[in-house]
Amino acid sequence: MADSSKFQPPRGMRDFYPEDMRLRSRIFDAWRAAAEESGFEAYDACVVESLELLKRKAGEEIVDQIYHFKDKSNRDLALRPEITPTLARMVAARKGALSLPLKWYTIGQCFRYERMTRGRKREHYQWNLDIVGEQSVSAEAEILATATRAMQHLGLQQEHYRIHYSSRTLLSALLYRLGIPPEHHPATFLALDKRGKVPDSAIFELLKAGGIADDGIPAVLRLLEIRTLDEALELLGTDSIAADEINFFLACAEAHGILPLLQFNISVIRGLSYYTGIVFEAFDIQGELRAIFGGGRYAKLLASIGGGDVTAVGLGFGDVVIAEILAERDATINKKPRHGYYVAAMEQEQILTTTRIASALRRQGHTVNLTLAPVKPRSFFSKADAAAAAFAILVGPDDIAAGTIRVKDLEMRSQTSQTIDNMLASA
Ligand code: HAM
């Protein structure tokens, strides 16, 4: 006999049995509802991309994690690790024809060959919410207000999580003040983003490789000790683009009612090289898991792939971390609510009657799980219960003789009768 335990999903990949799908659907429904409520339009895209689109030379972790392969025509292809380059490609392909700003969302599977830890898999679903072609940081606030709505739909309120934000414009201005020219900023961002994830000595080396002189490195690292926005702005002086941007972003956030969720955190830099302005990451209040969602402004990505000078802002919100948070809060989250009818016949002779009953109930808009072969009463009721049906109808020879059926309410443990003619006629 073949051994069924020989084949498992590859490490880091998930199967979704029906009980797992319940939670996943809940999350997807919350994402979709929030996006639609804020006027975002759905799009979809291919999971396999050209490797060239996904690869950037900046030394980001995500590029090393790409699952890539050659197809039979020797093309370099990859499973997407994220959706943003694909979105940029789609918008660039319709350059000039789309009316900007556009607000788009999608839910798609992404693949990253990650070192596995809690909340980190090699495949995850990601809700992407992006606004393309809007300069104002009111777009950042709109993105976050929409993500907050999704959290509310999932039962998570302000006391459960925080959105940490910072600004690469701000960090750039601070670096410039330290005498570090703009061409060294992208590498500096990626190096500083690794603080706390790799030893400081490795960061030192990365900063050095990024063009920062040895004696300048301590001052760069000290920037991460800035604790408040006021402290950062004081260093810059009031007359800065970064200050104006952040202040208007906060004013918009206040108007959306999400200001209490926001927390300035200079160490939120993000590990993707394309971000240029405000960046953010949401964490549960315990802060034990990786980010629930993350994103920011990317003003140059479209231009880099021929899409013209079009700015954008967006976020990616994965299903893994949020599922852990929800399951921790409610152990019964995968429990199925009672719903619909379970219908069966005791003997072959009643099968056509039960089929007609199921068909009539379905036409009335009910969910009906029809048992396709005769069943014994005991097994029928235990299956109906396990399937979390609300009502059960088991038809036997006596029911046909009497012309009536008994509808059992499985929740209330009560029973009503109906004539078969009535039931079939009411459809
Ligand atoms: P990201 O921060 O790399 O951003 O991923 C966004 C979210 O996807 C994370 O906060 C996390 O919830 C989830 N995620 C990422 N990798 C994994 C993993 N290995 N296992 C489980 N969950 C994961 C981006 O991907 C950007 N492209 C987002 C974006 C959209 N920025 C602008 N628009």
Image (spheres, rainbow, N blue to C red):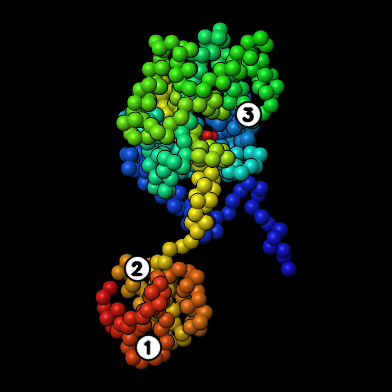
Residue at numbered disc 1: 399
Mark 3 is surrounded, within 10 Å at the Cα level, by few (under 14), some (14 to 19) or many (20 or more) other residues, namely: few
Kind of residue sitting beneath label 3: Gly
Q: Quadrant of residue 114?
A: top right
Q: Residue 179's x, y, as percent?
A: 56, 7
Kind of residue sitting beneath label 1: Asp
Residue at image location 47% in from the left, 39% down from the top: 161
Q: Is residue 347 above or below residue 180?
A: below
Q: Residue 79's x, y, as percent?
A: 57, 40
Residue at numbered disc 2: 366
Instruction: Determine whether the residue tagged by mark 1 lies in a helix, strand or loop.
Output: helix
**Is 3 on the left-hand or right-hand side of 144?**
right
**Is 1 on the left-hand or right-hand side of 400?**
right
Between disc 3 and disc 1, the foreground one is 3
Between the residue at mark 2 and the residue at mark 1, the CA separation in whole angstroms equals 22 Å
Q: Give the mark, 3 or 1, whose residue is nearer the N terminus.
A: 3
Instruction: Determine whether the residue tagged by mark 2 lies in a helix, strand or loop.
Output: loop
Can you tell which mark lies on residue 196?
3
Comparing 87 with 274, the one in front is: 274
Q: Residue 393's x, y, as percent?
A: 40, 79
Q: Quadrant of residue 148?
A: top left
Q: Residue 324's x, y, as percent?
A: 54, 48
Q: Give the mark, 3 or 2, whose residue is nearer the N terminus.
A: 3
Mark 1 is surrounded, within 10 Å at the Cα level, by few (under 14), some (14 to 19) or many (20 or more) other residues, namely: some
Instruction: Determine whether the residue tagged by mark 3 lies in a helix, strand or loop.
Output: loop
Which of the image's four quarters has the C terminus? Answer: bottom left
